[in-house]
């Protein structure tokens, strides 16, 4: 598949990705893990979730299609002392593992960026043992909510939706997870669905979230694609970035990111 990763791996994106842990990003999975399990972490990125999961199981293999980010993943492994973690360059549509290799196949915020999430789910199920779990979690951009509702942030949403869809991706992935699983051949009684959210409202959280999105809207792959596709001008992006900074400085500001979650019993 010729997928385009909307976010890329700019420093502003990594500030977000390295904040993620098993607790704040895979809580729905944790009670199902045991110390003897093996996990495949698809789209591991800088690997903070990967290494955190590894503290709970026997071993984890993290894969990434963008080989360059694996250097950052290796650095995270060293920081965590995660000797039971291995990283590989890999393609979720063609996983280089035999059938039934892992107890768990996990993907966090991955399906939303794929041109064929159903094919990805089928492949994740293929490499999971009978009785094992496929665990996926994705955000829903249109379901995000914020206060105050400024024109700049509404313009940000319009631009993000347009860029993601120009990449043949699905930014509102959470609401499609059940459908994708059913299209992958999973019976409904083998699926446990849930929703969790991230909230950014304290002064520290607002500063962090607002600053990274101000940067991402201009300097990341998302910002570059918006310009290249003719979806947003530099002037548009400056207004959006200023809007994020203004939002972050409001003591009453609030931003919620809803995440859909599926546990699929293979």
Image (spheres, helix red, strand yellow):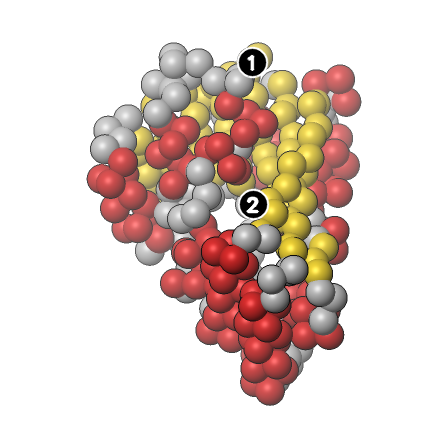
Q: Position of residue 178 (x, y in %)?
A: 74, 34
Please report the residue visible at 64 percent of the width from the left and 24 percent of the height from the top: 264
Q: Is 122 or 24 nearer to us in this picture?
A: 24
Q: Secondary structure at mark 1?
A: strand
Q: Position of residue 133 (x, y in %)?
A: 56, 21
Please report the residue visible at 59 percent of the width from the left and 53 percent of the height from the top: 201
Which mark is in front, 2 or 1? 2
Q: Vertically, is 143 above or below 8?
A: above
Q: How many marks?
A: 2
Q: Secondary structure at mark 2?
A: loop
| Other residues around mark 2 within 10 Å, as few (<14) / some (14–19) / many (≥20) | some
**Any mark on residue 34, and which?**
none
**Any mark on residue 130, and which?**
1
Q: Position of residue 161 (x, y in %)?
A: 69, 63
In this rendering, would 203 be left or right of 96? right
Q: Vertically, is 94 above or below 244?
A: above
**Any mark on residue 109, and which?**
2
Instruction: Give the mark nearer the N terminus: 2 vs 1.
Output: 2
Disc 2 vs disc 1: Cβ atoms closer than 8 Å? no
Please report the residue visible at 67 percent of the width from the left and 69 percent of the height from the top: 153
Please report the residue visible at 64 percent of the width from the left and 55 percent of the height from the top: 255
Quarter placement of the C terminus? top right
Q: Is 50 or 203 nearer to us in this picture?
A: 203
| Other residues around mark 1 within 10 Å, as few (<14) / some (14–19) / many (≥20) | some
Q: Vertically, is 28 above or below 226?
A: above
Mark 2–mark 1 Cα distance, whole angstroms, equals 24 Å
Task: Indicate the quadrant where residue 51 lies.
Answer: top left
Q: Position of residue 244 (x, y in %)?
A: 58, 70
In this rendering, would 80 be left or right of 238? left
Q: Vertically, is 114 above or below 226?
A: above
In this rendering, would 132 be left or right of 171? left
Q: Is residue 69 at least partly visible in the picture?
A: yes
């Amino acid at each position: 598949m010729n997928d385009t990763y909307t976010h890329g791996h700019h420093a502003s994106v990594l500030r977000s990705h390295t904040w993620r842990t098993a607790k704040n990003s895979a809580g729905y999975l944790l009670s199902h893990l045991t110390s003897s399990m093996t996990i495949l972490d698809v789209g591991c990125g800088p690997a903070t979730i990967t290494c955190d999961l590894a503290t709970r199981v026997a071993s984890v293999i993290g894969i990434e299609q963008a080989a360059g980010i694996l250097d950052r993943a290796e650095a995270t492994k060293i920081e965590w002392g995660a000797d039971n973690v291995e990283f590989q360059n890999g393609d979720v549509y063609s996983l280089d593992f035999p059938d039934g290799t892992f107890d768990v196949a996990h993907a966090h915020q991955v399906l939303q960026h794929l041109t064929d999430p159903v094919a990805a789910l089928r492949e994740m199920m293929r490499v999971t043992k009978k009785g094992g779990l496929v665990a996926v979690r994705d955000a829903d951009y249109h379901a995000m909510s914020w206060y105050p509702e400024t024109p700049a942030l509404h313009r940000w949403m319009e631009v993000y939706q347009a860029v993601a869809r120009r990449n043949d991706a699905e930014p509102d992935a959470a609401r499609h997870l059940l459908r994708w699983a059913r299209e992958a051949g999973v019976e409904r009684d083998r699926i446990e669905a849930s929703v969790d959210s991230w909230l950014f409202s304290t002064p520290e959280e607002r500063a962090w979230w607002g600053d990274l999105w101000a940067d991402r809207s201009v300097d990341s792959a998302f910002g570059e694609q918006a310009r290249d596709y003719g979806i947003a001008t530099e002037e548009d992006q400056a207004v959006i970035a200023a809007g994020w900074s203004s939002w972050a400085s409001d003591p009453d500001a609030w931003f919620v990111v809803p995440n859909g979650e599926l546990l699929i019993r293979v």
